[in-house]
Image (cartoon, grey):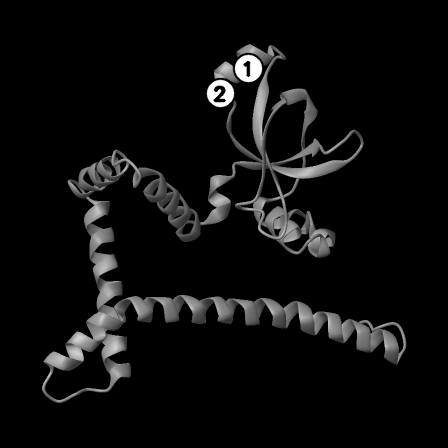
Amino acid sequence: MPKPRGGPKAHFKRWLINGIAIAIPLVITLLVLIVVIDFILGVLSPIVQGIIYVLPNDPPTTVVQLVTLLSLITFFLVVGVVAEYTPGRYISRRVHATMETIPGISTVYESVRRASSMLLDDDTEQFKDVKLVEFPHQDAYMLAFLTADTPRVVEEYVDNGGMVTVMVPLGPNPTTNGFIMHMPAERVYDVDITVEEAVRSIATLGVASSELGEEKLE
């Protein structure tokens, strides 16, 4: 194992940076979880209080909250299982279609549904491949994700030969933040980098860029 270079000052700086890089994501994740759980418990509070009022032995509030949360998770699991099989898939499509036709509610419902799908699905599965594009100006290159085939109407209006559609992601959340661009295929370059490596590099604001391509070499 190579001996770390530099004096005490360099060691202290490196240790401090590493500690911050490790601790801050953990702390933020815990805070988000606490806020989400607190919000859910607040929404379920009337139900919890009603259960405590009905039950004769006045069980502890914490126990009732836990049982209520488990019941809610079980409910979601049952709905998911039903939606997975026929006619569950048909019912699921009909529910979505019905909600999306209600004026004033359709926009909110569709936005929440798409956001929920992105949060619950594997974010990297929505991207087909990693590409390299010149952006935002010539001789400046950024990683981009190949997302879908370019709509034919775009190709016809531009009349610039074959085109590809890519997402040029922005940190620190590359899976949901970026620019959707329709570009000539000749200006999109192949690069031997996995989607996971690209996401990790952009999410760390370039800190993990030195690891790009290492999975191919192993």
Is residue 1 visible in the rendered structure shown here? no
Q: Which mark is residue 155?
A: 1
Looking at the picture, how far across and down is residue 202, in whole percent?
A: 65, 49
Residue that label 2 marks: 151
Residue 108 numbered mark, or none: none
Choose top left, top right, bottom left or bottom right for residue 110.
Answer: top left
Q: Residue furthest front?
A: 104
Q: Secondary structure at mark 2?
A: loop
Query: What's the amino acid at mark 1?
Result: Glu
Q: Position of residue 211 (x, y in %)?
A: 70, 53
Q: Amino acid at mark 2?
A: Pro
Residue 11 x, y percent position in the rendering: 82, 76
**Residue 142 appears left or right of 112:** right
Q: Nearer the viewer, residue 143 or 99?
A: 99
Q: Nearer the viewer, residue 89 or 45?
A: 45
Helix, strand or loop at disc 1? Answer: helix
Residue 182 in the image, given as x and y percentages of width and height: 59, 25
Query: Residues at badges 2 and 1 in contact (C-beta under 8 Å)?
Result: yes
- Residue plotted at (24% across, 65% down): 72
Residue at the bottom extreme? 57
State the CA–CA distance, disc 2 to disc 1: 7 Å
Q: Is residue 207 above or below residue 15?
A: above
Can residue 32 be seen from the camera position used here? yes
Density class for disc 2 (Cα within 10 Å; few <14, some 14-19, many ≥20) is few
Report the front residue among 196 and 14.
Answer: 14
Looking at the image, residue 201 lies above or below residue 69: above
Q: Is residue 120 above or below residue 68?
A: above
Residue at 68% of width from left, 51% of height from top? Answer: 214
Q: Is residue 48 left or right of residue 8?
A: left
